[in-house]
């Protein structure tokens, strides 16, 4: 069984591939030239757009991930615009710290929506996961990707970028989404 991973983000791809090792699906990367416009207004809509359009164009099963960081004191920004918040991870981190300034409320959550589409483009499975944490005043750690160095998880006293990748995969928003998704995939006939 082939499954196209509908992402251009190498950090995401690596994590998604790890979650899916328990299935005997053959993963394939989305062709670079296949670019999906994220016109949705929710994470779930955008995840579905990515999965559906890639599946339909290639006539194969596809999985889409739309995710981002929602900061309480910024009314949920950058949210679905997390990737569009800057051109590089460094710029995105810098902008977030600037917007938050010395605001005392550092509460935030990472959100991840996952969708899987069948070869005709219809969505067969959808899940969403959330992980709450705090935004540090400066980045810490070298692992992970994206906003990981700013995202501190009190229970572990570490940022996502400081954590053992296995622990991040377990506690993260993506981990929560896959914890709901995998039992459904395992039990399916597809
Ligand atoms: P694709 O659409 O091609 O999958 P993208 O990076 O554009 O890649 P999104 O639109 O879903 O993906 O944007 C997600 C943003 O949120 C992006 O800036 C990521 O770096 C960030 N993000 C998502 N999950 C993250 C995680 O686990 N750790 C750190 N940052 C994360």
Image (tube, rainbow, N blue to C red):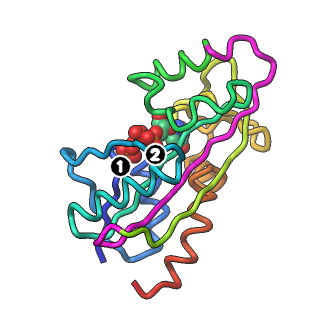
Q: Is residue 3 left or right of residue 129?
A: left
At 74% from the left and 11% from the top, the residue drawn is 102
Quick check: 1 above or below 72? below
At 31% from the left and 46% from the top, the residue drawn is 36
Which numbered dot is residue 40? 2
- Secondary structure category for the residue under label 1: loop
Whether residue 46 appears in this view of the structure is yes
Q: How many marks do you count on the picture?
A: 2
Q: Which stretch appears magenta?
A: 99-121
Q: Nearer the viewer, residue 18 or 65?
A: 65
Q: Is residue 165 left or right of residue 24?
A: right
Q: Quadrant of residue 133?
A: top right
Instruction: From the top left corner, tell me how far across and down residue 51 is, in percent.
Output: 37, 59
Quick check: 34 above or below 2? above
Say if the magenta span includes residue 118.
Answer: yes
Which numbered dot is residue 185? none
Q: Residue furthest bottom?
A: 189
Say if the magenta span includes residue 157.
Answer: no
Q: Nearer the viewer, residue 9 or 52?
A: 52
Residue that label 1 marks: 7
Neighbours of disc 1 within 10 Å: few (<14), some (14-19), many (20+): many
The quarter in which the C terminus is drawn is bottom left
Q: Quadrant of residue 96?
A: top right
Quick check: 128 above or below 124? above
Q: CA distance from mark 1 to mark 2?
A: 16 Å
- Secondary structure category for the residue under label 2: loop
Cβ of mark 1 under 8 Å from ligand 1: the answer is yes
Q: Is residue 96 left or right of residue 154?
A: left
Instruction: From the top left corner, tell me how far across and down residue 179 is, in percent.
Output: 61, 65
């Amino acid at each position: 069984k082939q499954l196209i991973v509908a992402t251009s983000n190498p950090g995401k791809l690596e994590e998604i591939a790890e979650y899916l090792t328990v299935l005997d699906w053959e993963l394939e990367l989305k062709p670079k030239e296949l670019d999906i416009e994220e016109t949705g207004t929710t994470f779930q809509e955008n995840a579905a757009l990515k999965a559906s359009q890639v599946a339909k164009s290639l006539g194969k099963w596809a999985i889409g991930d739309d995710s981002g960081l929602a900061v309480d004191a910024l009314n949920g920004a950058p949210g679905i615009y997390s990737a569009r918040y800057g051109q590089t991870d460094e710029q995105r981190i810098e902008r977030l710290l600037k917007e938050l300034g010395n605001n005392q409320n550092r509460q935030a959550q990472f959100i991840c929506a996952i969708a899987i589409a069948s070869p005709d483009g219809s969505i067969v499975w959808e899940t969403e996961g959330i992980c709450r944490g705090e935004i540090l005043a400066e980045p810490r750690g070298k692992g992970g990707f994206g906003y990981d160095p700013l995202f501190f998880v009190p229970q572990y006293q570490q940022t996502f970028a400081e954590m053992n990748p296995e622990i991040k995969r377990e506690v993260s928003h993506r981990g929560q989404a896959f914890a709901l998704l995998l039992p459904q995939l395992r039990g399916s006939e597809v």
